[in-house]
Amino acid sequence: MLNINNLYEGQSVYIIYRNPHTPTVATIQEATIARDPMDPSILSLLLYDYYHSIEEDDAIFESYEAAEQMFDQFMM
């Protein structure tokens, strides 16, 4: 898992994303680290054309394989 303090703008990352409409459904999604348009001083996850605040407990991975390993460990 990546440390949020080491993220940089433009970086491609992978996250385990829970569907907000169906909480029992989770997938691995690619996201981009980007400046938040509402507050350019902070970084956000750009996912599905939406900016999501990065939280301390977010599971952010450098590779799909690392995310998949964690997904299999906790979701399967």
Image (cartoon, grey):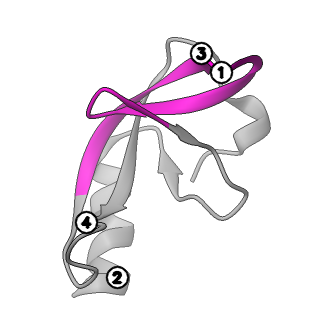
The amino acid beneath tag 4 is: Asn
Say which residue label 1 marks: 38
Question: Which tag, 4 or 3, sits closer to the chain's start?
Answer: 4
Looking at the image, which residue is at 20% across and 77% down? Answer: 22
Q: Nearer the N terminus, badge 4 or badge 1?
A: 4
Residue labelled with disc 4: 19
Q: Amino acid at mark 3?
A: Pro
Mark 2 and mark 1: span between their CA atoms?
A: 36 Å
Tell me if 1 is positioned left or right of 39 in this view.
Answer: left
Q: Which mark is residue 37?
A: 3
Residue drawn at (54%, 18%) of the image: 34
**Residue occupying image coordinates x 61% and y 45%:** 2
How far across and down, in percent of the image, does residue 42 sit? 75, 25
Mark 4 to mark 3 CA distance (whole Å): 23 Å
Q: Earlier in the sequence, mark 4 or mark 2?
A: 4
User: Left or right: 4 with respect to 20?
Assistant: right
